[in-house]
Image (tube, grey):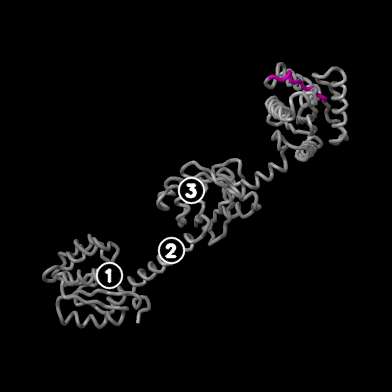
Amino acid sequence: MPEYAKKITILYVEDEDDVREGYSRALQRMSAKLYTASNGIEGLKQFQKYHPDIIVSDINMPQMNGLDMVRAIKKMAIDVKVVFTTAHSESAYLLEAIELQVEGYLLKPVQKKSLKTLIEKLAKNIVIEKEYEEQREILQYIIDSENSISVIANKEYISFASKSFLKYFGVNNIDEFNEKYASIIHIFTNVDDIINTQSIKASLNEGKSLYDFIHSLNETQKITRIKNYKNEQKSFLIYISEINETQFLINFTDVTEIEKQREEITKKANHDTLTGLYNRNKFEEVFAYELSQVQRYGYGLSLAIADIDHFKRFNDTYGHLIGDKILKLVARKLSSCTRSSDTVARWGGEEFVMLFPQTAYEDALVFLEKCRLSFDGFHYKECEQITLSFGVSSYKKGDTLESILSRADEALYSAKANGRNQVVGKK
């Protein structure tokens, strides 16, 4: 008894009673369920009612022939499997049968062994397709039931995607996504993140898989920002696991709010709450890095302390609220007159510290003089002019943050003692 055939249903249509009865017994034994009909009209009704997997039908029948019946059935179920039986004299129907894309064409009297072989072959394909489709449906259900956005993909295309994934990118199905983005790697457009289109391509060119690249990253590096179809950006934590040698399950967990909170906490830890500049702790961290670069590559490194002249007088005359506004304005102006590679931090009170990587002592003096001059005529509302004094020093072998700061502070003291509103340096 065929294994696959026992899992499928068959509709057998034959107008000759004795032939139908004889072959029905054989078809019944080899299938899970057999339905019979004596003509095309009856066969069409049986199909509409039971939707069998395979149709075995005579061609030349009264009322509606087999060709017309199958033509009508194909409009309802184009993939249904069809086997025609016919006598030699009906060979004129062969071309029409071929055009209907039927799976078999057996001459009467049909050999039961040939019929069984063909039915088993068709049943095997049907069962495998059903099992595959069931697996797809189960997998799709699992993916859709996940809270996170999920896809199954390789470097070229996506084969499964959760509804939440399709919704995020504004597409209705996988084909639409693959047509729009060409590849899963093209959604990673943020070049500031470790996971981006260029870095993935570079990894693939080195012979690494998408799994190898993402799996090798630490948790922080796996957080990447992805834009949706509305150009809105969210942060996702990317997890990837292998299904086989070419396919991977990728989960996108939305961590946007967590990232915002983390950034706020980091900002509070590293920034002065009043001015928004780096605080002392963060400045020390930056200095340590720049010092390591100087010691390794021999770059120049200069540091300055800036102090608002007569700041106590501002507080005493106009009040601390005005004093705070002046601190904010000065912080903004110092930031605007420095380069992106420079660092400005609030050191405490009315003092600011400035770090200039790859900058020699003489260049720092010239640069800070321009910065000082930018404060000419600088006022806050009805307050008197705001001026700054600067003390500058540069790195020399063996320096620490304390030693270079000490020389800059001595230079600042000289600037204050010599009348303020000037730049003084000490090597």
98 relative to 272 in the view: left or right: left
Residue 330, picture quadrant: top right
Pointers 1 and 3 in contact (C-beta within 8 Å): no
Q: Which mark is residue 51?
A: 1
Asked which secondary structure carries label 3, the reply is loop
Which of pointers 2 and 1 lies earlier in the amino acid sequence? 1
Which region is colored magenta?
382-391
Q: Position of residue 405 (x, y in %)?
A: 85, 32
Q: Nearer the viewer, mark 3 or mark 2?
A: 2
Q: Which mark is residue 183?
A: 3
Task: Give the amino acid type for the residue marked by disc 3 in the picture.
Answer: Ser
Q: Marks 2 and 1, how far apart in space?
A: 22 Å
Q: Residue at the location (15% across, 76% down)?
A: 15
Label 2 sits on residue:
136
Which of pointers 1 and 3 lies earlier in the amino acid sequence? 1
Task: Give the amino acid type for the residue marked by disc 1 in the picture.
Answer: His
